[in-house]
Image: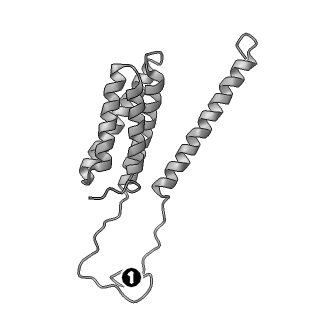
Amino acid sequence: MSIRISEGGRLFGFMAGLGGAAMIGSAALTWIVLGLFVVTGAVCFIGLGSRRMRMTAGALVVLAAAAGVVIALADPQSTGAVWGGWGAVLAAGFGIVALLRSGGEAPRTAVAGRSSTSSPGATPSGDFATPHKRRMSDASLLASTVVAIAIAVVVVFFLAVWSMCSDPTEWC
């Protein structure tokens, strides 16, 4: 059995698993448990072949990550809220994208008993097919997302520095 990591949202499931690993990396037991749920769900999402089981595993990832986001928002001063919160946000975001991307897989079997016509662009029944819109590949979407996150982190960093340096009582 071959797993194509770049198809069906599996790449985003892998990134959600990394968010779960960040949740495990925080020191609090709650974050570790939620991170284990996220990582387990991500591994199942990546490895399972059944669409129904993959959707269930993806839902587990999103729900556990969403619980982590709620905890981070409810108690931002708690131990592990920084790593756990970032991991939960990444896991929830990439988990949602993984679920959305997994639903668009094309069927792999051809319709039996139909022969194709000789006209280019014609469907097996002889009708001309409308051209399908090409969606961005998972790798391209992931790269764009990572670049957007990096830009957001840099902007937040410079805003924090500007805020600290604009007040004369703060360190600069």
Which residue is more in the foreground, 104 or 109? Answer: 109
Asked if residue 96 shows in the view, the reply is: no
Quadrant of image for the N terminus? bottom left
Question: Looking at the rendering, which quadrant does residue 161 occupy?
Answer: top right
Question: Which residue is denoted by mark 1 in the rendering?
Answer: 127
State how the image is colored. Answer: one colour
Which residue is more in the foreground, 51 or 123? Answer: 51
**Residue at 39% in and 89% down:** 118
At which x and y percent is residue 96? 40, 43
Question: Local crowd at mark 1 within 10 Å, few (<14), some, or many (≥20)?
Answer: few
Asked if residue 69 shows in the view, the reply is: yes
Question: Looking at the rendering, which quadrant does residue 80 occupy?
Answer: top left
At which x and y percent is residue 83? 46, 26
- Residue 172 to residue 16: above or below: above
Q: Is residue 52 left or right of residue 74?
A: left
Residue farthest along the top direction in this orientation:
169
**Residue at 67% in and 28% down:** 159
**Residue at 40% in and 23% down:** 71
- Residue 87 to residue 165: above or below: below
Residue farthest along the bottom direction in this orientation:
118
Question: Looking at the rendering, which quadrant does residue 124 occupy?
Answer: bottom left
Q: Secondary structure at mark 1?
A: loop
**Residue at 23% in and 82% down:** 113
Which residue is more in the foreground, 1 or 151? Answer: 1
Quadrant of image for the C terminus? top right
Q: How many marks?
A: 1
Q: Look at label 1 and name its amino acid.
A: Asp
At which x and y percent is residue 165? 73, 19
- Residue 15 to residue 138: above or below: above
- Residue 129 to residue 61: above or below: below
At which x and y percent is residue 91? 41, 37
